[in-house]
Amino acid sequence: MVILSSFWTPCFYYNDIYKSVKPIAFYTAMASVISIVYSIYVMSGGESSSPYMPYFETDRSLSTQIYGGFAILFFLYFIGASWLMIHAVRVEIRGWILPWIIAMFLVIVLQLYFGFHWLFDYYIYLDQIFAMLCLWFWMAYNIYTLLAIYSVYQILMEKQAPAVQDFGPECYTENTLFYWDETV
């Protein structure tokens, strides 16, 4: 059973869930590029002093370089998974969609974690609560895109299901299951 049959964004509406794959892949690839650029900016000495910024609690010497390098590698993987997802839908290989689904699930879990972290550590700052709500609205949109791509995965799984027809036990006898030529 397919979860979503159409996809809606604030600017576009797609009747066919297949047509939503390219915009979702473009969205995730561009968000990854922006995250890579921001990580490089912070790693090279840029500003990250506000509590709602991703590298707020890292120091400038070592942990920013480690977490920034990990973030860059992850978002490069996410860009590759986005391209692989487009290609997977084009050639109808559902297994190639799984790297994108796993990466998006990890992004959603991290957004949920950071939201709770901001809520419990910085609850006295109202701007931090607003940043948490914005992060969770973004997480809700990411869940929506994950459900759309999972629907495409389900459609491909139904298309690739083997068409095995069972005729019942009365059709299977010793003579029909195995043919043995006794003259040989």
Image (spheres, rainbow, N blue to C red):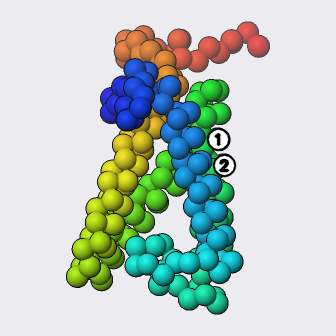
| Residue 161 visible to an observer of this rendering | no
Q: Residue furthest right?
A: 184
The image quarter containing residue 158 is: top left
Residue 88 in percent (x, y) is at 61, 34
Q: Which residue is mark 2?
A: 80
- Asked if one can make out residue 55 in the rendered structure from this viewpoint, the answer is yes
Q: How many marks?
A: 2
Residue that badge 1 annotates: 84
Q: Position of residue 70 (x, y in %)?
A: 62, 71
Q: Quadrant of the N terminus?
A: top left
Q: Observer-nearest residue: 59 or 147? A: 59
Q: Position of residue 13 (x, y in %)?
A: 40, 26
Q: Residue at x 65, y 15 (%)?
A: 180
Label 2: which secondary element: helix
Kindly identify the amino acid type of the residue bearing the numbered disc 1. Answer: Leu
Estimate the x, y position of residue 98 in percent, counting from the top left. Answer: 54, 45
Q: Are marks 2 and 1 in contact (CB under 8 Å)?
A: yes
Viewer-closest of 121 and 47? 47
Disc 2 residue crowd, few under 14, some 14–19, many 20+, Cα 10 Å? some
Element on which disc 1 rests? helix
How would you rate the neighbour count of disc 1 (Cα within 10 Å): few for under 14, some for 14-19, many for 20 or more?
Answer: some
Asked if 74 appears above or below 12 in the picture, the reply is below
Alpha-carbon distance for marks 2 and 1?
A: 6 Å
Q: Amino acid type of disc 2? A: Gly
Residue at point 37%, 35% (across, down): 10
Compared to residue 61, the image places residue 151 above or below, namely above
Residue in the foreground of this view, choosing between 59 and 85: 59
Q: Residue at the spot x=29%, y=72% of the render?
A: 127
Rendered image quadrant of residue 17 = top left
| Residue 109 position by quadrant | bottom left
User: Looking at the image, is 131 positioned above or below residue 164?
Assistant: below
